Image (cartoon, rainbow, N blue to C red):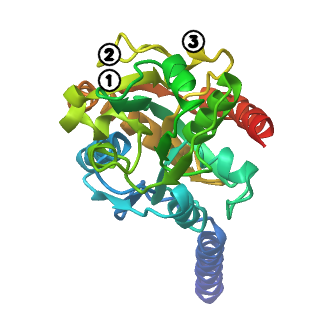
Amino acid sequence: MNQTRQESQSGSLQMRKLLTLTLMTTLLAGAAFAPAARAEYPERPVTFIVPWPPGDIEDQLTRVIAEEMTKETGVPAKVVNRPGGGAVEGATAVAQAEPDGYTIGSFVIDVPTMHIIRGNATYKRDTFEPIGIFLTYPFALVALKSAPYKTLSELADYAKHNPVKLAHFGYDLVPSMATFAAAKRLGFKFSADAAYEMVDCSTLKNGDADVMNTTMAVILACRDDINVLAAYTDQPLSVAPEAPLLSWEVPGLDITLWNGLFVPKGTPQEIKDKIAAIAKKAVQSDKAKEIAAPSGAGIYWMDAAHSAERIAKDYQKAEDILKEIQ
């Protein structure tokens, strides 16, 4: 009987070992095929690409956002300037990046609108997803105070009988196209025009141009010598409140120059939400307001959904402007 009991106990022990081994094997197999837990973003440095030379308002504000990301996450974030092709080179770099939140584009309106319409883009309309729009440039048409015209209508009258040279940031950019459309509606043509990587004080003072499209941020050094003929904004410029809006002078030309953050399509929503929260906090900071104030730039935070709506409307406006001037 003792032998039978020992055999029974031995059998039970072997059965328990077998069940334990089977359970462990099942658990290990399940772990092997279970999806890995996503690490908290960001784990490594984040790069913001600005497709323009350093110094203008979008560059400065993007650096504020990068600094806030570093502060909030403890992971370094940096701004890389990739000028070229009127912002196409920098946009292409973002388009080719992985949709993981580690490459973020700080793009002007032309990237998701005019460059696609004109066929300059290496990407498509759905290549990028907006995180949010945060800046309206203090863009304007300006001339030296010594010029024989003080308003856009006076410029039009003068240019019908005298040569006037225009400087701008590029032929495929919204402000340039709006300027050509304004000239057409007002019945004149520029005698010459040229695109520059930087349109600043020296452009006028050296005689390279008589009037120019630029942002107030890059002509602060010569502001006392400059007259604003028209502001390309939706509200009067705080630094030139007397200047009329382009949309007042030429009704219907109400497209403004803005800047926003974009990521490649497919970037996880939780990552986009985190970038948006950090960027919103950054542009609402005292530092951002101090940067914007001298130039009259408009800073705010427009969320992804409203940004997408605005881009769609501006795309149609850009198409209409191009049809008008062709």
Relative horizontal placement of residue 308, taking residue 220 as reference (left or right): right
The answer to whether 169 is drawn above or below residue 32 in the figure is above
Q: Are marks 1 and 2 in contact (CB under 8 Å)?
A: yes
Asked if the residue at tag 2 contacts the one at tag 3, i.e. Cβ–Cβ closer than 8 Å, the answer is: no
Residue closest to the eye, 185 or 49: 185
Q: Residue at x 73, y 53 (%)?
A: 118
Find the distance from the CA under tag 3 to the CA under tag 1: 19 Å
Tell me which label, 3 or 1, sits earlier in the chain: 3
Q: Nearer the viewer, mark 3 or mark 2?
A: 3
- Place residue 25 in its image quadrant: bottom right
Can you identify the residue that label 2 sits on? 238
Question: Label 3 belongs to which residue?
Answer: 248
Q: Earlier in the sequence, mark 3 or mark 2?
A: 2
Which mark lies nearer to you, 3 or 1?
Answer: 3
Q: Is residue 28 visible?
A: yes
Q: Secondary structure at mark 2?
A: loop
User: SS at mark 1?
Assistant: loop
Where residue 317 sits: x, y (%)?
72, 31
Q: Which residue is mark 1?
A: 296
Say whether residue 5 is left or right of residue 286: right
Callout 3 secondary element = helix
Disc on res. 42: none
Label 1 or label 2, whichever comes before in sequence order: 2
Q: Amino acid at mark 1?
A: Gly
